[in-house]
Image: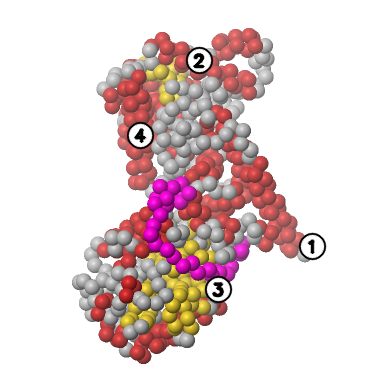
Amino acid sequence: MTETSNLFSPASLGLLRVAAISPALRVADVAFNVGATIAALESARAQGCMLAVCPELGITGYTCGDLFRQAGLLEAAQAGLRQIAEAAGRLGIAAVVSLPVPVDGRIFNCAAFVSSGRVLGVVPKTYLPNYSEFYEQRWFSPARFATTQHITLDGQPFPFGTDLLFAAEDMPDCVIGIEICEDLWAVEPPSGAMARAGATVLLNPSASTEQLGKVDYRRDLVRQQSARCIAAYLYAGSGPGESTTDVVYSGHALVCENGNLLAETERFHFDTYIAIADVDLQRLRHDRWLNTTYFAAGGSHTFRTIPFRLGDAQTDILGRALRRPLSQTPFVPSDRAARAKHCREIFAIQSTGLAKRLMHTGARKVTLGISGGLDSTLALLVTARAFDKLGLPREGIVAITMPGFGTTERTRGNAWALMQALGVTAREIPIHAAVRQHFADIGHDPNQHDVTYENAQARERTQILMDVANQIGGFVVGTGDLSELALGWATFNGDHMSMYHVNAGVPKTLVRYLIDWCADEEFSGETSRVLRDISASPITPELLPLKDGKLQQETEASIGPYLLHDFFLFYHVRYGYAPRKIFYLAHHAFNGEGESDDERIARPYTDEEILKWLGVFYNRFFSQQFKRNAMPDGPKVGSVALSPRGDWRMPSDAQSALWREEVEAIRRALAMCEARSTERTTGG
């Protein structure tokens, strides 16, 4: 698919495939270890990896003991480094491998960075453990004892020191920093200064012994350091081929990215094991842009930056499987336990936010419209919990169902059943007559089912809620959700408006799960039964007349699937991805690779469908900003929020042309590829 290479190359998408390797190993058998390392690099390269890290002292073995003072072993290690560098060059992969290096009468525990067939720099270990089973200071000197910035290995000069960073010329945002094993366990790991200096990928060749519970600590340490540094962190631990005289090494290798574990190896295997993942450099860059406080702190360290080339950063990867977790519902954890925890936290945030507003205003009553649909149901549940928090009687919740031209018996029945089950004050105020009178007043044909027909109903309902709120001395609780705000799927000064918007931070794909969770954990009996039926209902505004008692309008048929729109929203706002990146991720998520355990929403979408609705998303997101700029208060619950006072500030008249033009460029590129493929198949 060469026509798409500029759009879907690793460099364009910011995706770097990496490998943390724990090769088979024999203590002091340099030839075997070099061969195993080269074979592991071959395997990693065959799987598309562009960068790899191998364990601490992996060329000789970490547990050589006093053999580290043997000149023959040190010389063999240097020759082995040359072989690995040459092999990595032939394979087209950059790598970090480790060996003992004699310098000025001392021996240093070092990591060497190799690329394009050459050694580009050597980094000595900063902190040498000398406790319990570790005796490194018996053989090695810490980096602070180094007296030179350049060394000669095998007749070639190289930069030497802990102040080295390696910047990829053909992969934007790929800057590599190296620390070694114990460096990570220190109070101030060197990787922190490297990250502040611009390193986005941190590599750690390690030899960590195993003991009960240590694996969890190690995993958390790597994960948390990646989060502190807003970086990718590759950790490669020595395997069980190391000496087991007193301890055992497990071959634990991990790839983490900004606090998230992307991949890790199984432990305690004598064969080579590799953890492979696609690191998202654009995601890291965006999060660093956001975290201005941390990086504004700066640091006293200065670094030498050494350029290198990864080699295949322009290869088209659209058809290649993605090696990182990817969910069809990025707002919703796929793990059930995590999802329940997620829902519990969100529900607490929503209900506490509303409770604070009630306390501040002194109001003991509220109104809200109940349609029997998902959003108004969640808003009513949140309101009931807020009243419970404050010890207010639920009778102060005046819930009003307002049937109109498109109301079905199912939603009307569920609205009544829910209000009664929750013990709130339930009212029904039909809007048919009032809207017909309004049509007559403004001269609108009631048979013309256009935007005026629909919006008149929404505004009539809002007027009722506002006026009843005045009657009872309360305020209106809004019911619309984050996805509707993103798409502008709300009537301006209609359902768009309220005095407090409890669902403003909750996307549509999450609303249903929150209701399910409420049915499982927060409510029981009749309330739980009604909630399950509401959760199974289709999404519709019920504004068009029924035909034979059946719906003639479903929201997703008009504006597109919320499953896709929430996916687009997450990556557009949370990470600032370009259309090509969002399409690339959607292509993989909705073509068999995306995680989902809910058959109600999980489904495949073709590239054509994805592009169609991606274009709709950009058009609506930009054109409907004026509604968000006038939105009422409401609690932020997650990392994506659209309040103009908080997370998202955008002019109402910003242009979407740049984004929509890229969508069209993707469509043209895919069409060209399809045409070329057809020509090859037919022999044209």
Please name the residue that numbered disc 1 is placed on: 684
Kind of residue sitting beneath label 3: Gly
Q: Nearer the viewer, residue 310 or 568?
A: 310
Magenta stretch encompasses residue 220: no
Could you say whether the residue bearing mark 3 is in a helix, strand or loop?
Answer: loop
Residue situated furthest left in the rendering: 132
* Tags 3 and 2 touching, CB below 8 Å: no
Please name the residue that numbered disc 4 is placed on: 349
Q: Earlier in the sequence, mark 3 or mark 1?
A: 3
Foreground tag (3 vs 1): 3
Residue situated furthest right in the rendering: 684
Residue at 65% across, 21% down: 449
Task: Please tell me in which quadrant of the rendered image residue 413 appears.
Answer: top left
Residue at 56% across, 10% down: 433
Task: Please tell me in which quadrant of the rendered image residue 621 appears.
Answer: top right
Q: Nearer the viewer, residue 382 or 531?
A: 382
* Tags 3 and 1 touching, CB below 8 Å: no
Q: Earlier in the sequence, mark 2 or mark 1?
A: 2
Label 3, label 2: how far apart the Cα atoms are: 67 Å
Above or below, 434 against 8 in this view is above
Does residue 563 show up? no
Foreground tag (2 vs 1): 2
Quarter of the figure that contains the C terminus: bottom right
Foreground tag (3 vs 2): 3
Please name the residue that numbered disc 3 is placed on: 92
Please name the residue that numbered disc 2 is placed on: 463
The magenta span reads 287-316
Quarter of the figure that contains the N terminus: bottom right
Q: Nearer the viewer, residue 114 or 469?
A: 114
